Image (cartoon, rainbow, N blue to C red):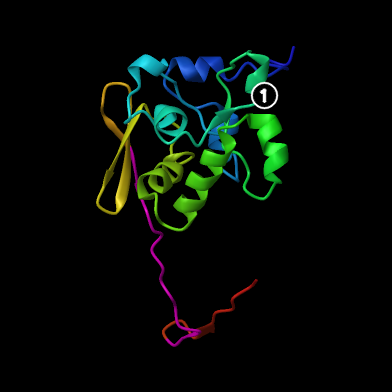
Amino acid sequence: MARISQNCIGCFPRLETGYQPQCVTTCIGRIRLQGYISPPDSVRPDNPIDFLVHVKRVALPLYPQTGLEPNVYYIPPIHVPTAFLRQMFGPGVDHALATYRRMREGEEPELQALLHLFGSSERISHSFRVAGDEVIGFDEEGREIVRVPLRERFQQRPHHDPELDVVRQDIP
């Protein structure tokens, strides 16, 4: 007996207690985002998933023409031919790509802030807010669970440290 699940169960016991699945929290590329989506008639713009799917329409279902409508959404990659992406994601892909490109150029600061929030906490963010130069994630009861800076602090250290008498090397 292994005492661990041999197949993915979406870390269901973690989800029940407000924690993200392990694959989301340990994803180096932060490509996995997890949250709860509202029905289209009761969208909450402060809900991270609603913001991506309903407000900015940058996250899309895969193969919407099949009508399966899973609760799995993807942000289409920008370096793939658009004709291929239209087959995979449908006609909304043009808007999603344009929005994502605007974000990369600094024209969608709220979207950029939200993407910084994902993967920054083991807890599930049920709502978010941008406050100054930080994005704040809140749990189901509205308690703050994480605060993420929009820009990483940069500190340049001298090549030679006379106090420690060491030379620092930058290794690419």
Main SS, magenta region, reads: loop
Q: Is residue 44 left or right of residue 97?
A: left
Q: Residue at x 58, y 36 (%)?
A: 93
* Quadrant in which the N terminus appears: top right
Q: Is residue 79 above or below residue 145?
A: below
Judged from the image, the secondary structure of the residue bearing numbered disc 1 is loop
Q: Residue at x 41, y 15 (%)?
A: 39
Magenta-drawn stretch contains 45: no
Pinpoint residue 14: horizontal percent, then vertical percent. Answer: 50, 20
Q: Can residue 4 be seen in the rendering of this structure?
A: no
Q: Residue at x 43, y 37 (%)?
A: 121
> Which of these two is toward me, 35 or 104?
104
Amino acid type at image mark 1: Tyr
* Quadrant in which the C terminus appears: bottom right
Q: Quadrant of residue 117?
A: top left
Q: Which residue range is magenta in the image? A: 146-162
Pinpoint residue 112: horizontal percent, then vertical percent. Answer: 42, 48
Classify 10 Å Cα crowding around label 1: few (below 14), some (14-19), many (20 and above). Answer: some
> Which of these two is toward me, 110 or 15?
110
Pinpoint residue 22: horizontal percent, then vertical percent. Answer: 57, 29
Q: Residue at x 36, y 26 (%)?
A: 126
Q: Is residue 126 left or right of residue 96?
A: left
Q: Is residue 169 above or below residue 77?
A: below
Q: Can residue 44 be seen in the rendering of this structure?
A: yes
Q: Is residue 71 above or below residue 88?
A: above
Which residue is the site of mark 1? 63
Magenta-drawn stretch contains 149: yes
Pinpoint residue 140: horizontal percent, then vertical percent. Answer: 32, 21
